[in-house]
Image (tube, grey):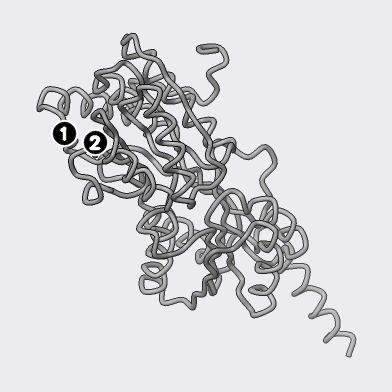
Amino acid sequence: MVRKYLSIVVCALAALSPLAAQSKPRQVKLAAIFPGSIQDADYNALGYVAMQTAEKKFKIETAFSERVAVPDAERVLREYINEGFNTIWVHGNQFNSAADKVADAYPAVTFIVEGDGKLDAPKPNLWYMDRNYYTGFYVLGRLAAVTTKAGKIGWLGGLELPFTRGEINAVKQGIADSGKAVTFDYVYVGDFNDAVKARQGAEGLISKGVDVIISAVNLGNFGLYTAVKEAKHKVWFTTTYTSKKDQAPANYLTADIFDFNVVLAQILDRIIAGERGGDVMMDYGTGKARHTDFPLSNVDAATNAAIQQIADDVASGKIKVAKNLKEILK
């Protein structure tokens, strides 16, 4: 009997050791929560596709919840854990606070969160997906600066969050580096998925004479399309996550493309191998998890070549995109 208890204690201590936590292969059951509809052909749809791809690639059980409100996130996370899911992906950094709290309560569960920049004190059971927004938005800023005829550029966003402030700063840096004398205005409409609010925000920018709008909303883009098509002067736009060329082909310039398949597969590979936490960057460049949609639309060949070179220089590191522009721009 003594030997039996001793064996149990030894096994328990081994399971708790850092080496065992990092090296023991893991059978993954993946659940994901999405802030919007998986049919948005945008951010949520990309997350859903990445999860379905991972299910087939790794032959794992998956589940998801869409349209999850921030106040409900903690409850939904706990429900999945109670159902036996041991890996939870929160697709949207508005859920990070909930994941951070639940991660403390369930140290045996692995959480995948998203953000921008390094975490100050990452938890041992947390994987961090750095979305690297800034690089792509710098390129959009350079494109907007050479495209505008009125000398007025606008940015259209949903909520004021650290990553959206970073987008704005990157656009500002792009404009400054272009050397063009243009003005820049931005507006938060209070929701990424409200088409009415997005249309109103876009119309407000257009009424100020803006002729290039850099969109950072999701389903709200459907309001943007109407605004640019009905504008009294020509208005071009860019989008994020997926190409929206088919929605307003005469006004579309490009998109800042995201591919979550790449980084989710990288993380799951390492989780299955036994790594409990870490971080993965969504690298920018042709063929990587983040890239600009080329060829550009509604520009001449010279502009396309110039912006392609800028994108290549950003990808190679020749052009440095700052995350904090306090020392550069006011």
Q: What residue would you read off at disc 2? A: 253
Furthest-bottom residue in view? 1
SS under mark 2: strand
Q: Assign a secondary structure to mark 1.
A: loop
From the viewer's side, name the closer residue of 68 and 82. 68
The span from disc 1 to disc 2 (Cα, nearest Å) is: 6 Å
Q: Residue furthest right?
A: 2
Image quadrant occupied by the C terminus: top right
Asked whether the residues under the numbered discs 1 and 2 touch, taking CB atoms below 8 Å apart as contact, a structural biologist would say yes
Specify few, some or many for label 2: CA neighbours under 10 Å numbering under 14, 14-19, or 20 or more.
many
Residue 261 spot, x, y in % from top left: 37, 58
Which dot marks residue 298? Answer: 1
Between residue 304 and residue 233, name the one nearer to us: 233
Residue found 43% across the figure and 49% down from its top: 220
**Residue drawn at point x = 54 percent, y = 64 percent:** 67
Q: Quadrant of residue 146?
A: top left
Q: Measured from the top left, where is residue 134 in percent x and y?
A: 44, 32
Please identify the quarter of the rendering in which residue 29 is found: bottom right
| Above-or-below relation of 69 to 116 | below
Q: Is residue 198 left or right of residue 1?
A: left
Say which of 218 and 48 sits in front.
218
Q: Residue 314, relative to residue 105: is it above or below?
A: above
Q: Residue at x 27, y 33 (%)?
A: 236
